[in-house]
Image (cartoon, helix red, strand yellow):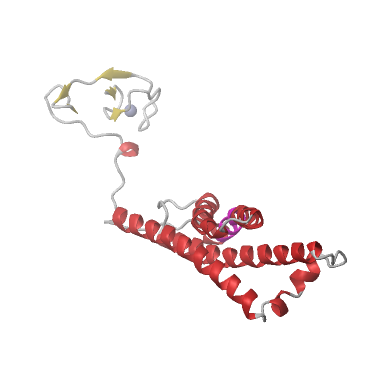
């Protein structure tokens, strides 16, 4: 520890200039019980810049609008991942977990909240995750149907034709139950991650 010879405040060892008065003139501080003291053995206050901010309980959500954009943008990577895993033939629902992590990361990157993972950010990321998982499942299933048509020799059927007619395909109960099953699986994984985030945010708030 060292102190400013001009104004007497305590400064960090790697400071070149006093944050209080700008002086570059320092001297080492004697310490007592690890606390810097002056010649009379009295504790020396830290420069105001280094005093810990009082915890006033104010939660900063950052720029919420940008946070929504960020959550949507990064979760698109989750949609791509879901699509790939679905087409390979594995259970894409596990992406539900990843999707929420991506949405949260997107919120924090774009909204830049001062509070780590604020509750509003978690809620927004959760809503974006639920919507994007539906989009991912819908597109993945449409592509799988399109692929099926091609294998059956219907080469004139385009992917966007299938996508456009998905509501019709979904009126078939077997197709619909396939979609619902996949979504339940994905949402279970998403909810697990959301619950972990809420739990740790609550714990931190205490
Ligand atoms: Zn000073």
Q: In this view, does 118 lie to the left or right of 13?
A: right
Task: Give the quarter the ligand 1 occupies.
Answer: top left
Magenta residues, as a range? 68-75
For residue 70: magenta?
yes
Q: Is residue 114 left or right of residue 43?
A: right
Question: What is the x, y in percent for residue 21?
Answer: 36, 30
Question: Where is 16 relative to 147, above or below?
Answer: above
Residue at (15% x, 21% y) in the render:
39
Residue at (79% x, 64% y) in the render:
159
Camera-nearest residue between 54 and 74: 74
Camera-nearest residue between 68 and 134: 134
Question: Where is 38 relative to 106, above or below?
Answer: above
Q: In which quarter of the image is residue 134?
A: bottom right
Q: Quadrant of residue 69?
A: bottom right
Q: Is residue 144 left or right of residue 29?
A: right
Question: What is the x, y in percent for residue 191?
Answer: 44, 63
Question: What is the x, y in percent for residue 73?
Answer: 62, 55
Residue at (57% x, 67% y) in the render:
131
Camera-nearest residue between 103 and 82: 82
């Amino acid at each position: 520890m060292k102190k400013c010879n001009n104004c007497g405040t305590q400064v960090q060892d790697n400071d070149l200039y006093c944050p209080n008065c700008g002086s570059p003139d320092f001297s080492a501080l004697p310490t007592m019980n690890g606390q810097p003291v002056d010649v009379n053995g009295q504790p020396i206050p830290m420069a105001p810049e280094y005093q810990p901010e009082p915890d006033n309980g104010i939660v900063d959500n950052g720029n919420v609008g940008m946070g929504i954009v960020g959550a949507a943008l990064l979760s698109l990577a989750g949609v791509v991942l879901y699509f790939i895993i679905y087409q390979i033939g594995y259970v894409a629902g596990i992406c539900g977990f990843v999707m929420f992590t991506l949405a949260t990361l997107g919120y924090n990157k774009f909204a830049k909240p001062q509070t780590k993972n604020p509750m509003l950010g978690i809620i927004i990321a959760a809503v974006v995750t639920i919507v994007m998982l539906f989009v991912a499942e819908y597109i993945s299933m449409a592509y799988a149907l399109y692929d099926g048509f091609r294998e059956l020799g219907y080469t004139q059927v385009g992917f966007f034709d299938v996508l456009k007619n998905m509501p019709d395909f979904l009126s078939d109960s077997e197709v619909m139950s396939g979609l619902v099953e996949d979504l339940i699986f994905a949402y279970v994984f998403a909810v697990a991650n959301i619950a972990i985030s809420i739990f740790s945010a609550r714990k931190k708030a205490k």
